[in-house]
Image (spheres, rainbow, N blue to C red):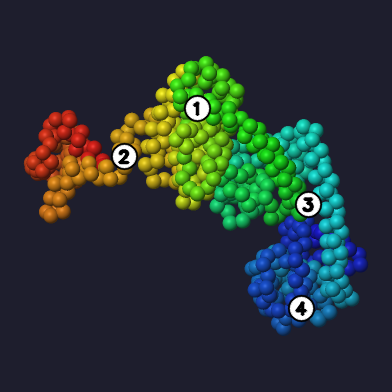
Amino acid sequence: MLLAELLDAPELGLRLMHSAGGMLDRPIGRLVTTDLLEPGRYLSGGEVVLTGLVWRRQAADSEVFVASMAGRGATTILAGKAQLGDVPADLLEACRRHDVTLVEVPIEVAFADVTEYVAAAGSAETGARLSASLVRQRQLLSSIAAGRSLDELAARISAEIGHDCRVLTPTGRHVVPGPSELDAETVDAVTRRFLTADRMPAVAVAPDNSYSLFPVGSGFGNRLTAWVLVIDGDHTTWSRDHVEAVHELSAIAALDRARRDEGRRALRPLVADALALVESGAPQAEVAARLRQAGAHAERPMVVAVAELRDDSPGEVALSLLEDVALTVGPAVVAPGRDDLLVGFLPFTPELPEHLRRAFGRLGPGLNRARLTVGISGETSIDALAGALEEARFAQRAARAARAPVSVVTSDEVASHVLLLGTLPDDVRRTYSNRVLGAVLDHDRRTHADLLMTLQAFLACSCSWTRTAEYLHLHVNTVRYRIERVEQLTGRDLSTLEDRVDVFLACKSL
């Protein structure tokens, strides 16, 4: 019940002496009866404190008492008159200073009467709330049976509780966008909080607002593949009825998700067949027909994405993640390939690589020690899917060489020598760099001549003697001497392009 409702009870005769901002319209928290001068250690926030003022020996005690309870978040004092005959003015002043609501309890009213009244009202509210919850559940289930969409049901609950409801996935896909989709920065904050929160529900703080996060379903599954209800505002300030309405929407959303997942599972064999046809070099017409059956737009430009999740999770987790990201741009046309890597056929847009990088990147906080690597081909058509698949596989191998929890590499980026070297095993790179530069490294260890540093600067300055000398703050003759010594030790002539390339790649292999 609300504090205002308690004050309106004629049988109690309570008198409001000071009202803190908005407290009369907030639900009554836990009732605590105490006559300790400093009760704060026994409070956790939101309590209504009943006190007979036995603790007061002098005026200064009121400040100590109110400061102690206000410091722990208690909101209201119900002060009895029996001990002192009246509520002292110093207590009223202390409540005003600390913005604590103060209520006078008549001499003839026992604190037990107050607690029993609140308990009885709470029981009545619980019964009414359960009855209303049952009615709401029946209405929601009837709406689903009648073909209502999850968007419509979320809008209904939003209107009921006065807070916009959305349903998102950890990759940022808006299953239910609500009145509008959240901006990218807000989605980043929401998904990060959902993946890292110790317990649910939780509150995410974004630049423009706070959002309450409720897991869809039981909340005990893998959060990487979960759905989350994202609702404007802080749920800790809501009424129980509104929180229960959100939990009911969560249960309905879980049913809706199960229906959607079942539909996608039914299409997976068709996608697997299409992928097998691509890998075997089947005729274009067969591949196109099978992709259309799986839901892809085979007549439009597309890209191929290859992904791998390295952890102890079942393969279903990785498949669900790639399907979820695919659904942000089109149908979920995803299947495991012959090398056990996941392959997705996605509609092409110029913004697609950056979109995928951000969507997959949102999963990073929830991966723990797992690693997610993704390779993306360039734009292709149905008649060149086999080549695009090889492009994506090569890009994924380059991504695998990275050390980040999430790495997304496009085929365009594989042209970089750094990524190309990254696809080689560590021992191959070490062997190559040692074979070319071993004598230089050994010479530097013995003499501290800084030959390697000079060589790297020389290559970075496009083998310009003057620019290298300026960069290193050395005389040109010193640079010439050191580079000549490098050439003697490596057996390479840095005036030739071929030897420059050998030495350059050896430096990068370090």
Q: Is residue 347 above or below residue 468?
A: above
Whole-Å distance between the Cαs marked 4 and 1?
81 Å
Q: What amino acid type is highlighted by mark number 3?
A: Asp
Circle 3 or circle 2, nearest the eye: 2
Is residue 120 or residue 318 the one in the foreground? 318
Circle 3 or circle 4, nearest the eye: 3
Q: Earlier in the sequence, mark 3 or mark 1?
A: 3
The answer to whether residue 310 is left or right of residue 119 is left
Residue located farthest toward the bottom when viewing the structure as drawn: 57
Q: Which residue is mark 3?
A: 241
Residue depicted at x 11% and y 38%: 491
Whole-Å distance between the Cαs marked 2 and 1?
28 Å
* Quarter residue 57 falls in: bottom right
Residue 354 in sight: no
Q: Earlier in the sequence, mark 3 or mark 4?
A: 4
Q: What amino acid type is highlighted by mark number 1?
A: Ala
Q: What amino acid type is highlighted by mark number 2?
A: Leu
Tell whether label 4 touches label 2 (CB within 8 Å): no
Classify mark 4: helix, strand or loop: loop
Circle 2 or circle 1, nearest the eye: 1
Whole-Å distance between the Cαs marked 3 and 2?
59 Å
Circle 3 or circle 1, nearest the eye: 1
Is residue 473 or residue 194 the one in the foreground? 194
Q: Which residue is mark 4?
A: 53
Q: Which residue is mark 1?
A: 276
Q: Which residue is mark 2?
A: 424
Q: Earlier in the sequence, mark 4 or mark 1?
A: 4
Q: Is residue 409 above or below residue 2?
A: above
